[in-house]
């Protein structure tokens, strides 16, 4: 019996298989966790890029190159001044991710003489059942550095419910969002209908 004990003590033929079996779950967790983390970070960066693109394109609009019409119904705001194309450009920036649940909201914000910011106009992408449009004249909390009296801002918001491929059961969807402000560049403000600069 002692001889067999000594033999087993020095037998290392199955040690590698046992170590592999013990470390395999951690290796799999590391691979899939790294994949999910990378995909989540890249999707969040894409959400930020969409918000920046939409705000920048809207801020660059030149109202002198588009007809101004006060009789266009509010339901057609997306078709005025290229907003439909701007929102579509934001959706293209989101490629290769699924844009079906991507929500883009663009609003014009007026900063009054007292520094209070209010919504002048708002529009959103049409691919969602969740309305995120802002109410006209609703007060907006903005950074004090942006609250320059008698100025206007473009406010772009992007929302995307990210569903992890492997952790969806535990976490469900995670709402990725980005919100940023830019100033109009080629005009004091951008108006839609009679909304915007008053």
Image (spheres, rainbow, N blue to C red):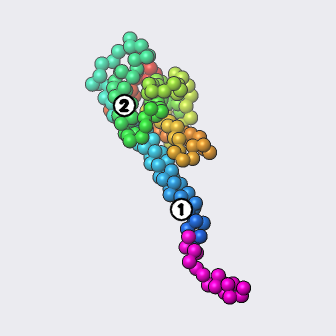
Q: In which quarter of the image is residue 92?
A: top left
Q: Main secondary structure of the magenta part?
A: helix
- Residue furthest out toward the left: 65
Q: Quick check: 55 left or right of 18?
A: left
- Nearer-the-camera pick, 53 or 154: 53
- The answer to which of marks 1 and 2 sits earlier in the sequence is 1
Place of residue 43 in the rendered image (x, y in percent of width and height, measured from the top left):
46, 45
Whether residue 148 is visible to the viewer of this picture, yes or no, is no
Place of residue 77 in the rendered image (x, y in percent of width and height, measured from the top left):
40, 20
Q: Quadrant of residue 61?
A: top left
Secondary structure of the residue carrying tag 2 is: helix
Place of residue 116 in the rendered image (x, y in percent of width and height, measured from the top left):
55, 31
Whether residue 45 is visible to the viewer of this picture, yes or no, is yes
Give the labeled residue for mark 2: 88
Q: Does the magenta stretch include residue 22?
A: no
The residue that appears at 49% across and 48% down in the rendered structure is 40
The residue that appears at 58% across and 79% down in the rendered structure is 12
Secondary structure of the residue carrying tag 1 is: helix
Q: Report the magenta residues as a range.
A: 1-17
The residue that appears at 53% across and 44% down in the rendered structure is 164
Residue neighbourhood size for the residue with mark 2, other residues' Cα within 10 Å, grouped as few (<14), some (14–19), many (≥20)? some
Residue neighbourhood size for the residue with mark 1, other residues' Cα within 10 Å, grouped as few (<14), some (14–19), many (≥20)? few
Up-down relation of residue 51 to residue 10 (above or below): above
Give the labeled residue for mark 1: 27
């Amino acid at each position: 019996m002692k001889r067999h004990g000594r033999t087993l003590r020095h037998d290392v033929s199955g040690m590698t298989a046992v170590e592999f079996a013990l470390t395999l779950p951690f290796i799999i967790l590391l691979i899939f966790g790294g994949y999910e983390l990378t995909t989540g970070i890249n999707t969040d960066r894409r959400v930020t890029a969409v918000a920046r693109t939409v705000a920048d394109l809207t801020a660059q609009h030149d109202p002198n190159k588009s007809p101004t019409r006060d009789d266009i119904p509010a339901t057609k705001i997306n078709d005025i001044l290229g907003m439909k194309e701007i929102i579509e450009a934001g959706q293209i920036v989101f490629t290769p991710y699924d844009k079906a649940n991507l929500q883009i909201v663009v609003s014009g914000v007026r900063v009054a003489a007292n520094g209070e910011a209010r919504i002048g106009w708002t529009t959103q992408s049409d691919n969602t059942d969740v309305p995120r449009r802002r109410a006209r004249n609703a007060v907006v909390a903005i950074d004090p550095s942006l609250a320059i009296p008698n100025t206007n801002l473009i406010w772009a918001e992007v929302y995307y419910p990210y569903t992890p491929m492997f952790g969806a059961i535990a976490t469900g969807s995670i709402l990725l969002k980005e919100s940023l402000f830019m100033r109009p560049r080629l005009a004091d403000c951008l108006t839609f209908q009679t909304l915007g600069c008053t």
